[in-house]
Amino acid sequence: MAAAAAPLIEGALARLLVALGIGVVADGATKEVLKRKEEADNARTAPIAKTEAQTKTKEKCKDCTPDKGTLVTRNWNMSDVSRAYQARITGFAPFTEWNFAGVDFDGFQSAPCLLLEAKAKYDQFFDDFGPFEWWKGDQPLMAEATKQALVAKPMPPVQLHWHFMEPLSYAYFTRIFAAMRLTIETHYTP
């Protein structure tokens, strides 16, 4: 039943997003959200076990404190590229984030107990030696990282990953987070 309604829902959602002026950016994210919903609907009707093999990778983490968080709508000022990157990394629809313990994260995946942050288009503020002197955005990002790392507990099972679209900012923040001894795993994800 849900599979039959998916094209209708997708079409209505696409028209709404186009009307709001975000249809092009959200198209991929919308398809991903609908795909995940369809997978969830199929999972409800699938047998619990087909073999005696363990399925721990798909089980929900029982001690995952971020599960107590909530989806929130945020309309931060960011480029279309940044918004699309965030949606691709997190799997969340644009303008949607995860709030846990009063702190916002770009995304959250329950099964691996994984909090996510996605950073795009930051290399414009860097050269090979670090941030340009005139750019003051590194301090707010370090404060954000510190705040997130403080609430992303207990580790394990909670994980906090920051994904960077560009190599200079990835290399810089990887070094900074290590020097600050933050429990953040960084990834270069173009």
Image (cartoon, helix red, strand yellow):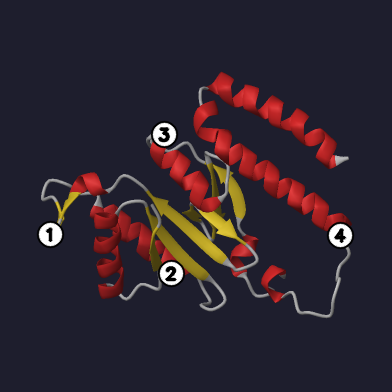
User: Helix, strand or loop at disc 2?
Assistant: helix
Q: Which mark is residue 105?
A: none
Q: Amino acid at mark 2?
A: Leu
Compute the Cα span from label 1 to label 2: 29 Å
Residue in the image at 85% along x and 76% along y: 51
Compute the Cα span from label 1 to label 4: 53 Å
Mark 1 = which residue? 129
Disc 2 or 3, which lies upstream in sequence?
3
Mark 2 = which residue? 150
Image quadrant in which you'd find residue 9: top right
Mark 3 = which residue? 80
Compute the Cα span from label 3 to label 1: 28 Å
Q: Is residue 60 visible?
A: no
Residue in the image at 17% along x and 47% along y: 135
Image quadrant in which you'd find residue 59: bottom right
- Contact, CB < 8 Å: mark 1 with mark 4? no
Q: Is residue 48 visible?
A: yes
| The residue positioned farthest toward the top in the image shown | 19
Mark 4 = which residue? 46
Q: Is residue 10 left or right of residue 160?
A: right
Position in image of residue 85 (x %, y %): 44, 45
Packing grade of label 1 (10 A; few <14, some 14-19, many >=20) is few
